[in-house]
Amino acid sequence: MAKKNEVTRRQFLNYSLTGVGGFMAAGMLMPMVRFAIDPLLKEGAKQDFVPVMDTSEITNKPVRKEFKIDQVDGWYESEVTQSAWVYKDEKDEIVALSPVCKHLGCTVDWASNPAYPEQFFCPCHAGRYTKDGMNVPGTPPLAPLDVYNKKVQDGKLYLGKPEPR
Ligand code: FES
């Protein structure tokens, strides 16, 4: 007669097989799940710094420089062209601004509106930004232009990812 709380041979086999089966299933499923979500586990949109121009070319007047970056979007990798407005401010610091308007994403130009010769101007809805990229109150954009992460190495300006401020 089986005592109370004693595990029968049938129960022992059931527990053992369930445990081993679960362990084997986890061993097979984990690599598949890891493969499926792999792009999500990578650091999101990490962008390396890319050389854009010689620092000796940079003056106080904003110039638009284009450069190419490798963009990884999930499993899809492509080369895309980006651009930045680059200049030196009054403290001789290099500034690199994103040209993407913070209203609806058009491209801003420097001094393209004769009425505002010292401002960035967005032709889509007459958005304006001061030279440091701050949005002019009363115009459509509600935020300043994004600023590129940057570094200078061996006389070259390298730009990374643009960041909001
Ligand atoms: S998109 Fe630039 S002002 Fe509207």
Image: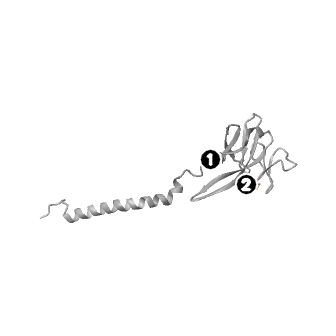
Residue 136 seen:
no
Name the amino acid type tagged 1: Asp
Mark 2 C-beta closer than 8 Å to ligand 1: yes
- Cα gap from disc 1 to disc 2, whole angstroms: 27 Å
Which residue is drawn at the image coordinates 62% and 47% (left, top)? 48
> Is residue 73 placed above or below 84 in the rendered structure?
below
Q: Position of residue 56 (x, y in %)?
A: 76, 38
> Is residue 147 placed above or below 90 in the rendered structure?
below
Q: Residue furthest top?
A: 91
> Is residue 138 placed above or below 61 in the rendered structure?
below
Name the amino acid type tagged 2: His
Q: Nearer the viewer, residue 55 or 10?
A: 55
Residue 103: which disc?
2
Q: Position of residue 106 (x, y in %)?
A: 75, 56
The N terminus sits in image quarter: bottom left
The C terminus sits in image quarter: top right
Residue 48: which disc?
1
Q: Please state if 52 lies on the left or on the right of 4 as rendered.
A: right
Ligand 1 falls in which quarter?
Answer: bottom right
Residue 155: which disc?
none
Q: Please state if 41 lies on the left or on the right of 161 as rendered.
A: left
